[in-house]
Amino acid sequence: MSSSFFIVVITLFILGCQGQNPKRGLPPPQGQYPTRPPPPPRLPPRPRFPSLGGPLLPRQPANRPGPLSNRNLVLFITQELKRNITSDPQNYTGSWVGRNYCLFKGFYCDTVPDKNITGLAGIDFNGARFGGNLNFYRFIRFLPDIAIFHANSNNFSGVIRPNINKLRYFYEIDLSNNGFQGGFPVSVIGALQLTFVDVRFNTYNGPVPPRVFSIQTDVLFINNNNFAQRIPSAFGNTTARYITLANNGFIGSIPQSIGRTWQTLTEVLFLKNRLSGCLPYEIGFLQMATVFDAGFNTLTGPIPQSFACLKKLQLLSLAHNQFYGRIPDSLCRLPNAYNFTLSYNYFNSIGPYCKRLVNIGRLDVRRNCITGLPNQRSAAECTAFYSVSRTCPRPGSFNVITCSNPAASLSSAQVASLQAMAPAPSPVTYKALEPPR
Ligand SMILES: *[C@@H]1O[C@H](CO)[C@@H](O)[C@H](O)[C@H]1NC(C)=O
Ligand SMILES: *[C@@H]1O[C@H](CO)[C@@H](O)[C@H](O)[C@H]1NC(C)=O
Ligand SMILES: *[C@@H]1O[C@H](CO)[C@@H](O)[C@H](O)[C@H]1NC(C)=O
Ligand SMILES: *[C@@H]1O[C@H](CO)[C@@H](O)[C@H](O)[C@H]1NC(C)=O
Ligand SMILES: *[C@@H]1O[C@H](CO)[C@@H](O)[C@H](O)[C@H]1NC(C)=O
Ligand SMILES: *[C@@H]1O[C@H](CO)[C@@H](O)[C@H](O)[C@H]1NC(C)=O
């Protein structure tokens, strides 16, 4: 938490980026296939914070902050929280004494843009492991200048109310691994400036309200809860670049509206749910996608030909499902193919490009039904699977190509050299699947 909270341009690990106002809707026909090197990352959009304009007071040292914004409110609620904390293994509260809250452990100050004096901009209680009956909403509502609230792995709970949107600078919330339960905290939606929403590892349950996908956020981590029911078709409204829905109880299929996220969606994890049905060809519109993981579900059908348009795709997993048919060879021509995992399905044939990827260790097709390859399912298993007739809705859509220059238009020499140059991926979302410390 060393950079300025209000002027910050980079949220934790978020690099790379997106233009200011992505237009929604399906993309127009695609232009040229990109050439390397990739364009330099642009800065992620930041909320527009109310400010006086003009140069502001630089951040002051914590021990000499000058006049403090909302001092009495902050001190009052901090003492209340302190009384409620019954366990404080890392002795945060020991330092919560005196009248300068900038010196309290876990508190970070910065200049408040519309006041031009120092205020409480950030709370970082990540991993503090506070015990006690701690009410998140009551606490934060007394912190009017807050921008960032990280409190994973504590015992905060309670209902989050719409008035949270009075917090005019609030843009980053991490409440993962706390004691929140019940339905999704839709009220956080009121805080329209959020760019980072992390509520994974709670015990939220029920459906995810469609409005969640209208939060104007860059990051939406809701993995490892007990969310169930279908993924709303409003999924396509999301502006998030990183989304984790993994390890929940979602059922039904991946919404066709996913194609509407074509300008933003970079990494998406659907793994370990109970999703079923066939893949929508609209996935092929995801020209920004580097990671797509729908492993460990009960999805079926062939891989749509449109996957040949996922020109940035580095990591793909469709493992442990019931996919079948021929693996489109164009998939294996994708220039950034780095680690494609299609194991534990029922694919029954592959072409020369895919064979090559298998040979160079970038495509895993173990436990399928591909004759001539090692480590396949038994003939009996394959015969049993294929003895049942299977179809997908919109069968014609599996041949739709969603771009004008699919991978299939690259020569084998181009493919080999692009793939050899493909950078090692450094996915952001997989880290979200590990419990917070
Ligand atoms: C903020 O305060 C500083 C120092 O007091 C002053 O130099 C600056 O002009 C102020 N900025 C605005 C926008 O009022
Ligand atoms: C907790 O921290 C305070 C001040 O930082 C210190 O005075 C106190 O001795 C510490 N208590 C424990 C139990 O370590
Ligand atoms: C956590 O908070 C709940 C109330 O939400 C309380 O029942 C429980 O005892 C608390 N656990 C700990 C370890 O403080
Ligand atoms: C402190 O505990 C009281 C009594 O349980 C509760 O009403 C209040 O909301 C709690 N405050 C905070 C900041 O957790
Ligand atoms: C999703 O976006 C569409 C079109 O912009 C809008 O009509 C709809 O209300 C949005 N859905 C939700 C749940 O916000
Ligand atoms: C490739 O991805 C799979 C599944 O996503 C993962 O289990 C495996 O460890 C990865 N392999 C390498 C070499 O990164």
Image (cartoon, rainbow, N blue to C red):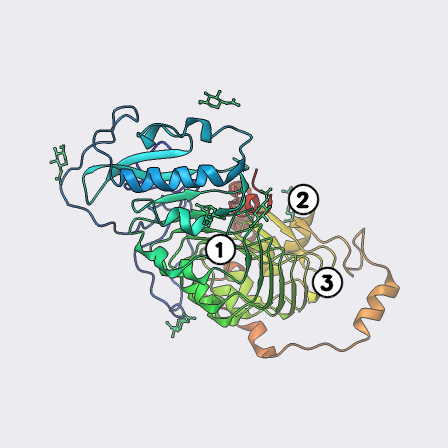
Marks 2 & 1, CB-CB < 8 Å contact: no
Distance of label 2 from label 1 (alpha carbons): 21 Å
Which residue lies under the disc numbered 3? 349
Quadrant of image for the N terminus: top left
Residue labelled 3 has its Cβ within 8 Å of some atom of ligand 6: no
Q: Answer yes or no: is residue 91 visible.
A: yes
User: Mark 3 or mark 1: which is in front?
Assistant: 1
Q: Is residue 384 left or right of residue 193?
A: right
* Mark 3 → mark 2, Cα distance in angstroms: 18 Å
**Mark closer to the chain start, 2 or 1:** 1
**What is the CA distance from the residue labelled 3 to the residue labelled 1?**
26 Å
Residue ID for mark 2: 361
Q: Which residue is at the front of the view, 314 or 122? A: 122
- Disc 3 residue crowd, few under 14, some 14–19, many 20+, Cα 10 Å: some
Type of amino acid under label 3: Ser
Look at the numbered discs 3 and 2 and tell me whether their residues touch, using CB distance below 8 Å.
Answer: no
Residue 214 sits in quarter: bottom left
Q: Along the horizontal axis of the image, is 288 left or right of 42? A: right
SS state under label 1: loop
Report which residue position mark 1 lands on.
289
Residue type marked 1: Ala
